[in-house]
Image: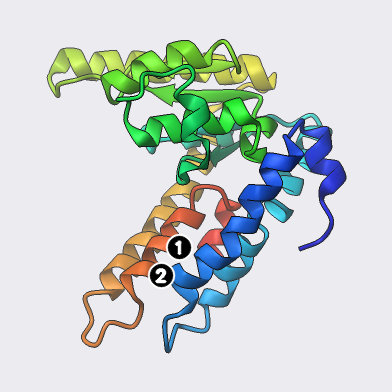
Amino acid sequence: MADYTQMWTDLGLDMERHGTLLCAIPPLYQTSYLWQENRPQAMAYFDFVVSEIHGLRVKELVDHKAKGGKVFGSFCVYVPEEIVVAANGINVGLCAGDEISIGTAEQVLPRNTCPLIKAAFGFRLERICPYFQASDLIVVETTCDGKKKAWELLTDYAPVYVMELPQKKGPKDFDLWLGELRAFKEKVEQVTGSRITAEKLSQAISLIDARRAALDRLYSLRQADPVPISGLDALLVMQVSFYDDPTRFTQQ
């Protein structure tokens, strides 16, 4: 990994805590993935992405912002990435997969809150996730009561936009979700200063659908006997899809 110290400092990371997190990643990755024998050679790309998890991709986001672009952070696939892409924005998944920040989160959230929520909340409080720090807007969703309360509190620490998810699947719920999509489109246009046209939205949908199709092919491939790629590596590929450039990811 290149030296990204100045970039991390400019993003406002807590350098000491961030360093602790980075030091924990290599041995964890070794015991989680690299011990496997006969891994597909194409996994080398995804190993590289993880080795630069807080480096090269973050620099791409910073460079995008330097050119006037906007970055949107999200946690869930219910957030419509296509709308962000159609406005020339970048959507990235945010960190929530390590317990290092849970203790800090419990200073604000109840201790019996879901560990996933506490981890995500704590990453923002501790300023150890460059994706959080690079996001111009954090887009969240109401998938559970714990998240609903956490997002209320998160507004004290970051710019947050909440998308209301319908709880059922009737006509009224469809209308509710359609209204949420339209409202989000207006918010994205406001943040980016870019108007979303039907043509831009169609292109964005094609781009993101191509990524979904690539993942679907990967999942289908695992039905073969013998299985050519482990469940661990398939999971790794899926996780990388949340923050890698969608065009590059689909090609790889």
Q: CA distance from mark 2 to mark 1?
A: 6 Å
Image location of residue 36, percent across then percent down: 42, 81
- Residue where numbered disc 1 is placed: 237
Q: Nearer the viewer, residue 232 or 139?
A: 232
Circle 2 Cα neighbour tier, 10 Å, few/some/many (<14 / 14–19 / ≥20)? some
Res 195 quadrant in image:
top right
Residue located at (14% from left, 21% from top)? 168
Q: Are marks 2 and 1 in contact (CB under 8 Å)?
A: yes
**Mark 2, secondary structure of its residue:** helix
Asked whether residue 120 appears in the rendered view, the answer is: yes
Mark 1 element type: helix
On screen, residue 147 above or below 96: above
Say whether residue 252 is visible: no
**Residue drawn at the location 72% of the way across and 53% of the way down:** 55
The residue that appears at 56% across and 26% down in the rendered structure is 197
**Percent coordinates x, y for residue 247 in the rendering:** 58, 56
Amino acid under label 1? Val
Name which residue type carries label 2. Answer: Asp
Residue that mark 2 sits on: 233
The residue carrying pointer 1 sits among few (fewer than 14), some (14 to 19) or many (20 or more) residues within 10 Å by Cα, namely some
| Quadrant where the N terminus is found in the figure | bottom right
- Front-most of residues 166 and 29: 29
Tell me: 131 left or right of 118. right
